[in-house]
Image: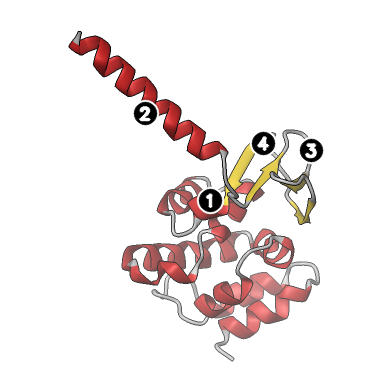
Amino acid sequence: MIKLNLTILIITGLFSFFSCKQGGNDNSIVVFQGNKSAVNKEDKTPINHVVENKREESVIVNHDSVRCNINFIVKLKNTMENPSENDVLNFLYTFDESCSASVEFLEFSNEILFQILFEHPDVVLKLLSHGNVKTNLILEVLKSPVNDKYDIKDIIKRIDETKENEMKNKVKKSLRNE
């Protein structure tokens, strides 16, 4: 009898959990496998950016669950040598004003932001321009590196090597703290 009640309780809990997850406005983006465009999950309208999905993975991004989520930073760090644009985009989505209370998040995200900008400036510039991310906040973060692992002059040199992009000068100004 106790085993049956426990089973019913677990099933009811799981049902409630998944029912809540499907309802409501979750500000999600769906990137369809093989299709390189992103659309709003709720009304199927196109998002004004393109995500190249080189690994052909299906990705669902819920902006609320990505904000301040250190797991996306860890994932990008682990794929830093050859990250997908989705990994970089999800990382950029983690930046939010509400993260200011988490020192661990702020330091780790700052470190990885400078690393990804140094190693893959073209991807970062592209996504900052078209990724529907909090660009102004990220530009502010670039004004305050938490360590000196990457020389700002070297990052700017790498940015200068990328093709022209409207975001290029904004990022360089932030790096120079102008």
Q: CA distance from mark 3 to mark 1?
A: 24 Å
| Kind of residue at badge 3 | Asn
**Disc 4: which residue:** 55
Residue 9: image tag: none
Nearer-N-terminus badge (2/4):
2
User: Which callout, 3 or 4, points to the residue nearer the camera?
Assistant: 3
Say whether marks 3 and 1 touch (CB < 8 Å).
no
In what element is the residue under mark 1?
loop
Q: CA distance from mark 2 to mark 1?
A: 38 Å
Nearer-N-terminus badge (1/4):
4
Q: Is residue 146 above or below residue 81?
A: below
| Kind of residue at badge 1 | Met
Q: CA distance from mark 3 to mark 2?
A: 35 Å
Q: CA distance from mark 1 to mark 4?
A: 14 Å
Q: Is residue 176 left or right of residue 131?
A: left
For the residue carrying disc 2, how many other residues have a C-alpha within 10 Å: few (<14), some (14-19), or many (20+)? few
Say whether marks 2 and 1 touch (CB < 8 Å).
no
**Disc 3: which residue:** 35
Residue 13: image tag: 2
**Disc 1: which residue:** 80
